[in-house]
Amino acid sequence: LLSEGGKLWYLVSRAVPVLLLFLIPGINVIALPLWIILGCWFMAIEYGDYPLANNGIEGKAQRTRLAQKRLDSLAFGAGVTVMMLIPGLNFLAMPAGVVGATSLWLDRLKET
C-alpha cells in the first residue's frame, strides 16, 4: 500500500505542473507532447513494478532502474499506451503489459 501511495504521489507531483501548462497561452503547445511522454513514462513505471518488485526492487530504486534504460522504458510505455487506445485490444493490454515488462526486465534491466 505504501509503494502504491509513493507511485501516486510521484504521478501527481509531475502531472499537475504539466496540466497547468495547458492553461498558459503559447506554452500550451508543448503541453500535449509532454503529457504523452509523461503518460508513456507512467505506464513503464506501473507495469515495470510487477517484475521489479518481485525481484526486491522498490519505489525510487525502480524509477532509477527504469531511467537507466529510459528510451527502452519509454518505448515499452508507448506500446502499452497504444494498446490501451485500441478498442478490443485494450482488454489484452494489461496481461501483455505485464509480460512485456517482465521481458524488459529480463532482457534489458536485470544486468544494469
Image (cartoon, rainbow, N blue to C red):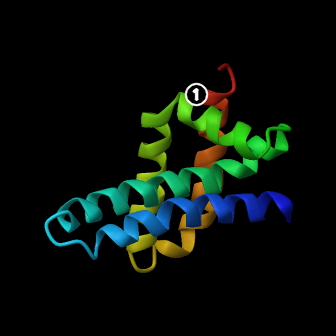
> Considering only vertical position in the picture, is 18 above or below 51?
below
- Number of residues whose C-alpha sits closer than 10 Å to that of mark 1, classed few (under 14), some (14–19) or many (20 or more): some
Viewer-nearest residue: 91 or 22: 22
Q: Is residue 43 positioned above or below 20 on the image?
A: above
Answer with left or right where residue 102 lies relative to residue 77: right
Residue 39, horizontal then vertical, whole percent: 45, 61
Quadrant occupied by the N terminus: bottom right
- The number of callouts visible is 1
Q: Can residue 79 be seen from the camera position used here? A: no
Who is closer to the viewer here, 14 or 98? 14
Does 67 sit left or right of 72 as displayed?
right
The answer to which quarter of the image holds residue 104 is top right
Q: Which residue is mark 1?
A: 108
Quadrant (top left/top right/bottom left/bottom right) for the C terminus: top right
Direction from residue 51 to residue 78 in the image, left or right: left
Place residue 71 in its image quadrant.
Answer: top left
Q: Nearer the viewer, residue 14 or 90?
A: 14
Image side of residue 65 versus residue 85, left or right: right
Q: Residue at x 80, y 57 (%)?
A: 3
Q: Residue furthest left?
A: 26
| 102, above or below 18, in the image | above
Residue 30 image offset from top left, x and y in percent:
22, 59
What type is the residue that disc 1 sits on?
Arg
**Mark 1 residue element:** helix
